[in-house]
Image: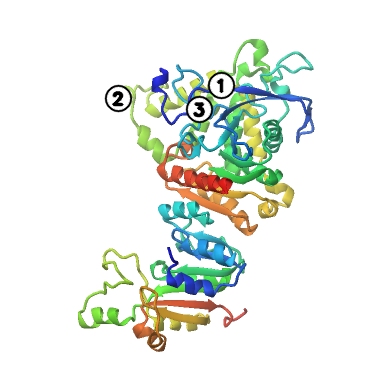
Amino acid sequence: MSLRPDLAIISRWIEPGSRVLDLGCGDGTLLDYLQRTRAVHGYGLEIDGDNVNAAIRRGVNVLQVDIDQGLGQFRTASFDYVVMTQALQAVNHPARLLEDMLRVGREGIVTFPNFGYWKARVALGLRGRMPVIDSLPAQWYETENVHLCTVQDFEALCRNLSIAIRHRRVVDWQHRSNWAMQRAPNLLGEIALYSLSGAGRAGR
Amino acid sequence: MSTATLPADSVGLVSPRTLQVTTPLQLECGVTLPSHELVYETYGTLNAERSNGVLICHALSGDHHAAGYHSLEDRKPGWWDSCIGPGKPIDTNRFFVVALNNLGGCKGSTGPTSINPQTGRRYGPDFPVVTVRDWVASQRELQAALGIERWAAVAGGSLGGMQVLQWAIDASDRLRHAIVIAAAPKLSAQNIAFNEVARQAILSDPDFHAGRYYDHGVLPRRGLMLARMLGHITYLSEDAMRAKFGRELREGRLNFGFDVEFQVESYLRYQGRSFVERFDANTYLLMTKALDYFDPAREFDDDLAAGLRQSQARFLVISFRGDWRFPSSRSREIVDALVEAGRDVSYVDIASRQGHDDFLMPIPDYQGALGGYFDRIAADLAR
C-alpha cells in the first residue's frame, strides 16, 4: 500500500533522526513510515481504542490520552516536531493546542480541511446547506468537527499568536496538487498542510 | 471435572516445581539468606534459542499458579488464566511462560511458614522484610537456573507491575519488554494508610501471638479476615459495588442487629473467611510492607526518568479507568517518566468499571492490546 500523499509531504518536512510527537495518530501509519524512512523516534497520542491497538500491532509507540486535555504532561521543547493531521478542526481549543504544540515542539505540522474550498462555498453560498464533500464527508449532525476554518482564518490565527508559517501546501482530497491551487489556496485547496514554528513569538 | 471438559484454550493440568537457590541472597534490609527455595510453574516450551521466556510477577495475594489446573477436581484455574494459554494474549503456543511464588510467600517458596534452619522452628515474625528489589534479585536466580539470558517479556499487574518496573531498572539487559499493568511508581499516603489498617487488624488479633501463632496452634483469623475485607473494598470501584450489591438485603427486611444484612456485607465476609484458609498472616504483613517500601525513583533523587534512562527494555503500560486503588493518573506518571527518558512505551487506558481487579478480567480491549503487543514481540523474535 502506498503512503497517503499528505503523509509523504509531511515526511519531507521532517529531518531524519528527530523526535516526533503525533497528536491524533490514528493507527500509527505516519509514525511507522517516519520510523522506517526517517529514523525518527516518536510517540503518537490517540484516544480511540481500536486505533490504539492497531498502532501497537504496527510497533509504534502510542499513548491512549485525550489531546483535548492539552499537552501539559510534556516538557517544553522536548520534541523536534509536534504533528497533528486532520484533527485541529475536531479539538475543543484549537488556539490553545497550537500554542501548546509549539511549546512542546521546535516546529509544528498541522493539516486540516479548508472550509474556504470552492465546493464548500457553493454548498453553503448557493445551496444554503452545510457542505458534504470529500474532505468533509459527514452530515452536520454527525460530524466530529467543531472548529472548521479556512486557509485565511488559520493564517490570521497564526498572525495573532505570532506563529511563523514555514511552509504551506494545499492539495485536493486525494492529495494531488497543481500550480493553480498554490496560487489560490483558499479557493482551490481542499486540504491545507502547514509547517509552523514559534520563532516569531515573543521570548523565543 | 473430567479431562474432556478442560477448556481447549487452557494450558491444561500443570504441576509446580521447586528451585533450590544455593547462592546467598543479600537482602536490602541487611540480612543474608544463605539459601532459599522458589516454587514455580511453566507453561509452553522454551525454544532452541531460549529467547521466548516470559516471566509473570504476581500481586499481593498471588502465587506461582497463574494458569491451568492442578487437578481435574479444581473448581477454578490459575489466577491469570484469562490471559495465559494457547491462543490467549500471552500465547503458550509461542511463549515459554514462567510464574513463581515470591520469596516470603506462603505457597511453597521460602517464607514465614518455612522452617528456619538456624532454630528448627518456623520463621514466623523472624522472616526478614523483603522488598520488590529483593524479589527481582531472587527471580534472576530462577532466570539463570532456567538458562534464559534475556526474557522476551516480564509482565505483571498491581504489585506484580511494580516488580516489572524494578526489573527494567535493575536488570534492563535481561529483558526485552516490560509490561506494567494497573501499577504505580510508588504508593500514595492513602495506599499506605489502607495497608496500615490491614496490618493493625492482624497485629491486634489476640490469636496473632506476635507472629508465633503456629506455635500456639491457632491462626489470627479475625485479623487476616478484616485485612482482606478492607482490601476487597479497594479492589472494586464504587460503581461496581453498587451494580453488584446495591443496598440489597439478604432476607429482604431490616433486622435491627449487627449480623449480616446487606449483600455487600455477606460478600466481604465470604471473601475474608475464604482468604484465611489459603493465606498466611505473616506473609500478608510482608507483602504490604514490600508495597509501602516500593519507590524505585528514590535512589535517583526522586527522578524516575533518570532511573529509566539507561533501561534497554521497551514498555507497555496499561491502566483501568475504574481503578481507584492505582488510578490511571499513577500509570501516567510512569508513562511520562518513560517519555522524558526517551524510552519506547505504549500506554493503554482501558475503559472499565470494575476497579483494580480489572487486570484479571477478560476485557476485550485489554486483551486486544495485550495480545497485540505480544504478537509484536513474537514477530520481533522471529526476525
Q: Earlier in the sequence, mark 1 or mark 3?
A: 1
Q: Amino acid at mark 2?
A: Gly
Percent x, y for residue B301?
A: 73, 52
Q: Residues within 10 Å of mark 2 (few under 14, many from 20)?
A: few
* Residue displayed at 41% across by 80% down: A170
- State which quadrant residue B209 falls in: top right
Whether the residues at callouts 1 and 3 have beta carbons within 8 Å, the answer is: no
Establish whether labels 3 and 2 are both on one chain: yes
- State which quadrant residue B124 falls in: top right
Q: What residue does disc 1 label?
A: B15
Q: Secondary structure at mark 1?
A: loop
Percent x, y for residue B166?
A: 66, 43
Q: Chain of mark 3?
A: B
Q: Amino acid at mark 1?
A: Ser
Q: Chain of mark 1?
A: B
Mark in front: 1 vs 3:
1
Q: Earlier in the sequence, mark 2 or mark 1?
A: 1
Q: Residues within 10 Å of mark 1 (few under 14, many from 20)?
A: few
Quadrant (top left, top right, bottom left, bottom right) of the N terminus of chain B: top left
Per the model, the C-alpha gap separating discs 3 and 2 is: 36 Å
- Number of the label disc, if any, that sits on residue B108: none
Percent x, y for residue B307?
A: 69, 51
Q: What residue does disc 3 label?
A: B78
In the image, B243: left or right of B270? left
- Number of the label disc, if any, that sits on residue B252: 2
In the image, A141: left or right of B235? left
